[in-house]
């Protein structure tokens, strides 16, 4: 796994993990973070190997602590790649609202990491 491009990493505000989502998070093999208390939801740009600078986008969800520390190698979820940053932003907003309702673990995440 290559190092993420933090130049094009746009995170939303940290969201406290609800009880239901925390129980689900602890069931996943990718769970290895000490005392996660928040979700970090981010839109990440992936530069395409073209002669001019061009990006595709994905939305990632990471368990983090209250300070925003997270393990970039262990996302809870990564979306499929999208050509439009607007579509990625819309998905990030939907996932943010879902996590605030403590229903992220029941949301139909197509490419859940486990």
Image (cartoon, rainbow, N blue to C red):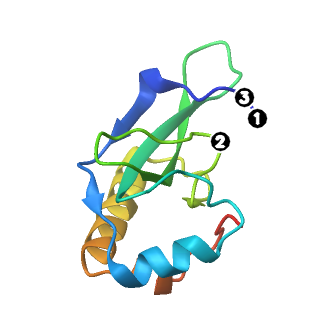
SS assignment at label 2: loop
Q: Which numbered disc, 2 or 3, marks the residue that appears first in the sequence?
A: 3
Q: How far apart are marks 3 and 1 (CA)?
A: 4 Å
* Residue identified by numbered label 1: 1
* Residue identified by numbered label 3: 2
Q: Where is residue 102 in the image (x, y as percent from the top left)?
A: 32, 80
**Left of 35 or right of it: where is 32?**
right
Q: Residues within 10 Å of mark 3 (few under 14, many from 20)?
A: few
Above or below, 73 against 112 in this view is: above
- Picture quadrant where residue 95 is located: bottom left
Q: Residue at x 58, y 14 (%)?
A: 52
Q: Which residue is drawn at 48% across and 42% down?
A: 70
- For the residues bearing labels 2 and 1, Cβ distance under 8 angstroms: yes
Q: Position of residue 108 (x, y in %)?
A: 53, 83
Above or below, 68 against 74 in this view is: above
**Along the viewing direction, whichever of 111 and 14 lies nearer the viewer:** 14
Q: Which residue is drawn at 35% across and 81% down?
A: 19
* Residue identified by numbered label 2: 73
Q: Where is residue 90 in the image (x, y as percent from the top left)?
A: 33, 61
**Along the viewing direction, whichever of 63 and 52 lies nearer the viewer:** 63
- For the residues bearing labels 3 and 1, Cβ distance under 8 angstroms: yes
**Left of 48 or right of it: where is 15?**
left
- For the residues bearing labels 2 and 3, Cβ distance under 8 angstroms: no
């Amino acid at each position: 796994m290559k190092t993420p491009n933090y130049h094009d990493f746009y995170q939303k505000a940290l969201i406290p993990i609800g009880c239901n989502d925390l129980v689900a998070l602890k069931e996943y093999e990718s769970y290895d973070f000490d005392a996660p208390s928040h979700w970090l939801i981010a839109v990440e740009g992936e530069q395409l190997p073209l002669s001019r600078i061009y990006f595709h986008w994905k939305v990632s969800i990471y368990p983090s602590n209250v300070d925003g520390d997270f393990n970039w190698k262990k996302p809870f979820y990564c979306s499929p790649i999208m050509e439009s940053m607007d579509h990625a932003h819309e998905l990030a907003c939907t996932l943010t609202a879902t996590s605030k309702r403590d229903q992220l673990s029941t949301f139909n995440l197509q490419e859940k990491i486990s």
